[in-house]
């Protein structure tokens, strides 16, 4: 069967309405239009999007990362509910970690709800480990946030690790008839 090609790309102003729709679908409106515009304009921020190849003006996934001194802070990871469980989250996270490595950063970190088993499993797959927790971090539910770190982005063999992940992600996407080319 023929695979449909995916293109991971940086967010531009054209996709702002689509990114707000995705944010709404995944988080109920976490960031505003101005928030996304600020991210786009910041040299220390990377916002990657995954347009739906079969549906015009629709984004399947989004990821954002801040570069702070030698650290990559993953601030948003979102896959539209209609497209979850197909390997797209892995593709976004791989893109963010590759970007962090290209920036010469040393380690990556993020916070995640302790009940978010899907996200935690995804992060563990890429070598994130839990280093601590923020008590009652999510005010609406009183839930704790786990603080996760992925060290060693500056290790001489990290580029080999990226190559292995590219293969892993490519194989996972192929199971759902997606293909992806590194740009
Ligand atoms: C978390 C999220 C980004 C994962 O994206 P996804 O595209 O569904 O994940 P993938 O299909 O790439 O799966 C990656 C891995 O995560 C794990 N995983 C994914 N969904 C899972 C689930 N429902 N239960 C357990 N593990 C799961 C698996 O290890 C999976 O690898 P595998 O399919 O090869 O076994 C997505 O579910 C999402 O956007 N959720 C809503 C927003 C959110 O919670 N964001 C994270 C905030 S920290």
Image: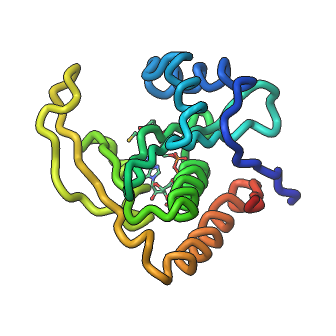
Q: Is residue 118 left or right of residue 15?
A: left
Quadrant in which residue 138 is drawn:
top left
Relative to 110, say whether 137 is above or below.
Answer: above
Q: How is the image coloured?
A: rainbow
Q: Position of residue 74 (x, y in %)?
A: 42, 46
Relative to 150, say whether 65 is above or below.
Answer: above
Query: What number of labels is visible?
Result: 0
Quadrant in which residue 47 is drawn:
top right
The quarter of the rendered structure image containing the N terminus is bottom right
Residue 134 seen anywhere in this rendered image of the structure: yes
Quadrant in which residue 176 is drawn:
bottom right
Q: Is residue 111 left or right of residue 27?
A: left
- Residue lying at the far right of the rendered structure: 2
At x 40%, y 65%, the residue is 106
At x 52%, y 41%, the residue is 45
Q: Nearer the viewer, residue 7 or 171?
A: 7
Q: Position of residue 148 (x, y in %)?
A: 29, 55
Q: Position of residue 43 (x, y in %)?
A: 55, 41
Residue 81 seen anywhere in this rendered image of the structure: no
Relative to 161, say whether 57 is above or below.
Answer: above
Q: Position of residue 119 (x, y in %)?
A: 40, 48
Q: Is residue 74 left or right of residue 1?
A: left
The quarter of the rendered structure image containing the C terminus is bottom right
């Amino acid at each position: 069967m023929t695979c449909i090609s995916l293109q991971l790309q940086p967010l531009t102003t054209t996709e702002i309405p689509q990114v707000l729709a995705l944010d709404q679908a995944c988080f109920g409106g976490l960031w505003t239009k101005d928030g996304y515009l600020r991210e786009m304009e910041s040299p220390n921020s990377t916002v990657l999007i995954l347009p739906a190849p079969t549906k015009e003006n629709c984004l399947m996934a989004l990821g954002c990362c801040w570069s702070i001194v030698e650290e990559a802070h993953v601030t948003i990871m979102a896959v539209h509910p209609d497209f979850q469980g197909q390997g797209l989250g892995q593709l976004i996270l791989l893109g963010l970690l590759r970007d962090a490595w290209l920036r010469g950063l040393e380690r990556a970190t993020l916070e995640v709800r302790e009940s978010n088993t899907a996200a935690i499993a995804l992060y563990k797959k890429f070598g994130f480990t839990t280093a601590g927790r923020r008590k009652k971090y999510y005010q609406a539910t009183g839930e704790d946030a786990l603080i996760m770190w992925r060290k060693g982005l500056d290790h001489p063999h990290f580029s080999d690790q990226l190559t292995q992940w590219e293969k892993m992600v490519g194989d996972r996407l192929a199971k759902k008839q997606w293909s992806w080319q590194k740009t």
